Image (spheres, coloured by chain):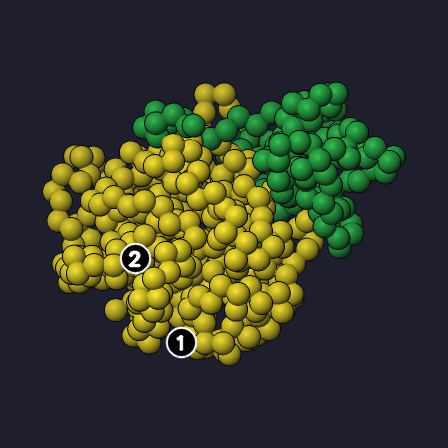
């Protein structure tokens, strides 16, 4: 199993308590962004496009703890920016571990090997390393050569020292499903605990606006990569959410399920859309016009979104919301191969590229 | 009211206007509202000139624009090189200018591919896009 039993129990019992209390809108993962500066400049990222004075700001450990206590979640994801650039990241992690929160510290791992001494292995702490694919694809996706190799070194060192490590992968237009499947093999061979996936979101603020996936293309791509799974592939995600990505089930968005807190405050309405900020979590829940978001709203900014920050919470609710959802989760956990002989549509496997040869994502004619 | 979601599926991404250096008209209420909405979407700093003569340079990170009058609406600004965040009512704003650099302009994948090919041809190694300088 990819996740410790204690973590599964903590999340399950938390969700059940919320449902028994009749809470209609509750979070289960906090996306805590302690800073927005990064040591990469990925063209598809909408999180780092700010003036320098904004990038210099950061949350204090006390602000981080206050946010976690305000929303009461059992799991805290720490993305950014690059969290390892925060001068007090160890203090933040220590404080969250002391509060028995399960932490996913999301990092590009360029600083991981250097900073590992700041942390202690713990069942509460997982390094979630940003890896977008095989070497050439990853380096191209993050707009810097050599990044994949440094990240792999960081992963190896963290695993050697007993840390929990997962990968997180964002896929854009042009992703080669054969390459992605080889990448899964590579990551499991490295020894990571599990993998996380997401289609890239159409950030308004991202420099690149040409390579986002439509819903139709997302379902097609994820059907290709997640059907006919290898026995040793492990995904650190809700199995029902993965079925949603494959087009096998439908969900409405649950944007309050993974709220975001950063230097601006509590982000409305979700991790991806920046439609304003609330000063408290209670204000976020109360003052956000939730009916304006999600695919059913007709909001064009939500039309193509299938990202975990809105939909994995929906899948988790499904697991615990009905006997049918629970049984579907058990079934998908036990029977996880998803045999589908037509998934690849007859496309021939593409060869692995040589190191140093740039894999180009198709660019616009306007380039 | 938004159009049905299915009609939006293939229209991905936005076309960012080149607003850097722009001084929008702010003579009427609709002009002010439009200008401040664009300031909120802008990926750089703006300079607000208030009716009391003060100039505020900073990043507009939030707006509350649903109020019936300009006095009921405000922008929230992270002031450049100061720790404070400031709320400014729309009705207090005399003028607005997009004075800061658009931090995402020119950083598309197409631009990256061109840069990569040019540098590779020049024999460079470890090619990449640099993170935004902080000074």
Chain hosting mark 1 = A
Say what secondary structure mark 2 lies in. Answer: helix
For the point 68% across and 44% down, the residue is: B76
For the point 52% across and 48% down, the residue is: A287
Considering depth in this image, is A63 or B81 the residue closer to the camera?
A63
For the point 62% across and 42% down, the residue is: B62
- Label ID, residue A123: 1
- Label ID, residue A359: none
Same chain for the residues under marks 1 and 2 in the image: yes
Q: Is residue A59 above or below residue A305?
A: below
Residue at far front of view: B68
Residue B109 can be seen in this image: yes
Q: What colour has chain B?
A: green
Q: Residue A141: x percent and y percent?
A: 46, 43
Considering depth in this image, is A225 or A11 the residue closer to the camera?
A11
Q: Is residue A311 above or below residue A121?
A: above
Sequence-first tag of 1 and 2: 1
Say what secondary structure mark 1 lies in. Answer: loop
Q: What colour has chain A?
A: yellow
């Amino acid at each position: 199993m990819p996740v410790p039993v204690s973590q599964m129990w903590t999340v399950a019992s938390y969700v059940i308590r919320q449902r028994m209390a009749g809470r209609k809108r509750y979070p289960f993962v906090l996306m805590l962004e302690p800073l927005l500066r990064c040591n990469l400049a990925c063209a598809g990222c909408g999180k780092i496009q700010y003036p320098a004075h904004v990038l210099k700001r950061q949350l204090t450990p006390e602000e981080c703890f206050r946010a976690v206590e305000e929303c009461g979640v059992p799991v805290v994801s720490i993305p950014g920016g690059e969290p390892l650039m925060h001068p007090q990241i160890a203090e933040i992690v220590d404080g969250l571990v002391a509060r028995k929160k399960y932490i996913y510290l999301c990092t590009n791992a360029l600083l991981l090997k250097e900073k590992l001494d700041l942390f202690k292995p713990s069942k509460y702490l997982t390094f979630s390393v940003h890896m977008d694919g095989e070497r050439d694809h990853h380096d191209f996706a993050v707009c810097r050569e050599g990044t994949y190799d440094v990240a792999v070194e960081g992963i190896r060192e963290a695993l050697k020292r007993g840390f929990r490590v997962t990968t997180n992968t964002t896929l854009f237009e042009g992703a080669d499903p054969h390459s992605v499947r080889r990448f899964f093999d590579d990551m499991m061979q490295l020894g990571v605990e599990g993998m996380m996936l997401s289609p890239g979101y159409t950030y308004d603020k991202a420099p690149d606006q040409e390579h986002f996936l439509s819903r139709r293309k997302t379902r097609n791509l994820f059907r290709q990569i997640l059907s006919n799974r290898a026995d040793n592939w492990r995904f650190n995600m809700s199995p029902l959410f993965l079925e949603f990505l494959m087009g096998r089930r439908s969900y409405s968005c649950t944007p309050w399920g993974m709220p975001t807190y950063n230097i601006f405050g509590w982000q409305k309405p979700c991790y991806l859309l920046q439609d304003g900020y609330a000063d408290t979590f209670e204000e976020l829940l109360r003052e956000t016009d939730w009916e304006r978001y999600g695919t059913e709203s007709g909001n064009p900014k939500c039309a193509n979104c299938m990202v975990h920050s809105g939909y994995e919470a929906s899948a988790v609710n499904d697991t615990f919301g009905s006997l049918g959802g629970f049984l579907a989760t058990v079934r998908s956990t036990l029977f996880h191969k998803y045999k589908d002989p037509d998934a690849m549509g007859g496309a021939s496997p593409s060869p692995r590229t040589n190191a140093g040869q740039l894999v180009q994502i198709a660019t616009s004619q306007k380039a | 009211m938004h159009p049905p979601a299915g009609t939006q599926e293939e229209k991905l991404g936005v076309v960012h206007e080149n607003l850097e250096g722009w001084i929008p008209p702010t003579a009427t209420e609709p002009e002010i509202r439009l200008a401040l909405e664009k300031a909120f979407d802008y990926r750089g700093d703006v300079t607000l000139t208030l009716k009391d003569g003060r100039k505020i340079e900073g990043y507009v990170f939030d707006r509350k624009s649903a109020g019936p009058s300009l006095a009921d609406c405000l922008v929230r600004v992270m002031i450049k090189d100061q720790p404070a965040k400031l709320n400014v009512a729309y009705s207090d704003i005399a003028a607005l200018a997009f004075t800061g650099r658009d931090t995402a302009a020119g950083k598309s994948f197409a631009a990256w591919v061109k840069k990569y090919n040019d540098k590779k041809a020049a024999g460079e190694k470890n090619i990449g896009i640099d993170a935004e300088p902080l000074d």
